[in-house]
Structures are given as C-alpha cells and as structure tokens.
Amino acid sequence: MTKLRVAVIGAGGIGGAHLRAYAAWPDLCELVGVADIDLALAQTKAAPYAIPAFADYQTMLDECRPDAVSICTPPRLHLPIAQEVARRGIACLCEKPPARTLAETQAIVAAFTDAGVVLQFAFCHRFHEPVRQVQELIAAGKLGKLIQVYNRFGFRFDRAASSWFTDAEVAGGGVLIDTLVHSIDIFRALAGEIVHVDAAVSTTLPVQVEDSASLQVVSATGVIGSLNCSWVTPVSEAEIRVWGTEGEAIIDYATNTGARYHLAGDHDWTVLPFELPDRFVLQAEHFLHCAHGNQPPRVSGADGIAVMHVIEAAYRSAQGNQTLVRP
C-alpha cells in the first residue's frame, strides 16, 4: 500500500492531536506539512515531525501536495477550506462541529460529494473502545430493549472567556455546538436518529454564548436521552450510562478500563478490557483506510448533517420556539 501524504490545517491543541495520531501509522502515511495563520505555532507543532510549517494553507497545498488533510481550524473557516480541499480532490477529515450552521455543513458535504472525494467528520467518540463495546452489547441484545441514555461532559474551561470558543461569529455558538455536538453523535450511534429535542441553556461566565446546556432527546424508536455539558463545573464527570430492559452499561472516561455492564440477575459488574490505542489514533487509522479507498467513512457527511439538524433544533428550543428536529 502506497503511503498517503498527509497535512494538517490548524495548529491548535486538536491539530496537535491529529499530528500525533497520524504519526502512529507510519506504514499508512507520512506527514508533509502543517499550516496555521500563527506561523510560530505551526512551526512549534511541525518541529517534532521534521516537516515544514506554513502561514497559508493554500501555499502548503500547492507545495506539499497532500493526498489527505485534517481541518482543525475554528468552525468559521471550515467551509471555505473544505471547498478548496474538495476542489483539489484531497480526502478530508474535518473536525467537529462540522461547521457553524446546518447550511454550511450541507455545503461542505455537497462539495465533496460533487468532487467524488472522501469526507469524514471527526466525531472521535465513535472510535472510543468503550463506546464500541456498548454498541456491541446493544446490537447483541444483551441489555434488552434500549430505554434510556445519560451522558455528561462537564469540566472547567479556563480559556472560555478569552478565546474564539465563545465568539458566536467564529464558533457558531457556545458549549452546545462545541461540546454537546459529541453527545448528540454518541446518542445517535447508540440509539439511532433523534426526532425530538428540548433544550435548556445558561450562561455563568462573562461571555455572550451559553456555557452550560442540557438536552432531552427522543430517538425514532422511543429511546430517551439526557445529554448534559458545562464549561464551568470544576469537579465533574465524563460519563455515559445506558439502560435497557435487561441491564445497564457504563462508560466512564475517568477510568483506564473498557465499558462495564450489569445484567438482571448478575451479582457483579462485568468489566470489559481496554487495550487498544486511543480514539484519536483509531480515528486516524480509519480515515487513512478510507482515503486509500478501502472502506467508506464510519462517520459520513450524512452524519454531520444529521447532528447539525439536532443542534439547530436545540437552539430553537432553547429560544422557546419549536422543538421538532425536522420541522
């Protein structure tokens, strides 16, 4: 298999995670460049891999000619960069949220569909081994009929008040679109499509966007979900709980184990192993195989559009308007 030439656009924290993940697969790819409008930051991220850094992503695309790229910029830049990447026929792994709006997301998907080029959205929790384990428990019927899903991602985001994350023009919103976007995708992976959402948001920090949010969602098969996140809670959990008619499963991100489950009649919990690479490394591997043409993306353009339908419905609900996902 010929190695893919891979570049990363955006040299922030998540761009660094993508570089590290690609570097774990030297038989599949070689890193060829990093671009960021902050050239010094790009140079810092590029140095460990001995690759060139650029202040302009188009210059990098011209000079490095990558076969695949990761887009790790703020959401405002996703659409114009994605359209240029698609125009050049380059496979793309685009970070979450897919874009600031549903319309922008649809435009990104259309660009890659028209170009016939691979597009994968970076909903990395699909590649988290405990999530995959719970998917298998559900598919095998071990938990019985799925009834409820609970998820909370809570933490203190110390940079929130002074970064682009709280600039709605750049990010598209606050914690709902930035963090709960993962929760929505996880729920869809476990319980199927969401058809109804009720949302509540609040703001504690001196910012113009929501910094805490909760969604009550319902799937097409009647599964109820409670999805919660906050940027202002310093002592909190990152956890998913799933209840069915025959048992419960828990994914605890604070542990180094796989999922654990407890079935009706069991005296003890069964703890599953967790020995695989982390979700970013597995996500990169999957994308590289997709870019090689060996398989379709597990997280497709359609998934990005579906998540953004829910995001926009949630914002309408939080504003006191209609709550149907597809009115």
Image (tube, grey):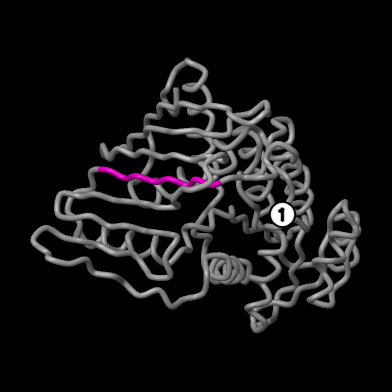
- The answer to which image quadrant residue 169 occupies is top right
For the N terminus, the quadrant is: bottom right
For the C terminus, the quadrant is: top left
For badge 1, the amino acid type reads Ile
Residue at the top extreme? Answer: 321
Residue at the left extreme? Answer: 265
Residue at the front extreme? Answer: 235
Compare residues 258 and 8 and report the one nearer the observer.
Answer: 258
Residue 54 magenta: no
Tell me the residue at 57%/65% (across/down). 280
Q: Position of residue 177 (x, y in %)?
A: 57, 37
- The answer to which image quadrant residue 137 occupies is bottom left
Compare residues 231 and 89 and report the one nearer the observer.
Answer: 231
272 lies left or right of 120? left
22 lies left or right of 265? right
Circle 1: element type? strand
The image shows residue 237, relative to residue 79, as above or below, that is below
Q: Position of residue 106 (x, y in %)?
A: 61, 38
Q: Position of residue 75 (x, y in %)?
A: 70, 42
Q: Disc 1 marks which residue? A: 71
Tell me the residue at 71%/54% (across/down). 72
Magenta range is 148-155
Residue 149 magenta: yes
Instruction: Please rate how many residues cluster around mark 1, counting C-alpha atoms within 10 Å: few if below 14, some from 14 to 19, many from 20.
Output: many
Q: Position of residue 258 (x, y in %)?
A: 37, 68
Tell me the residue at 59%/56% (across/down). 120
- The answer to which image quadrant residue 30 occupies is bottom right
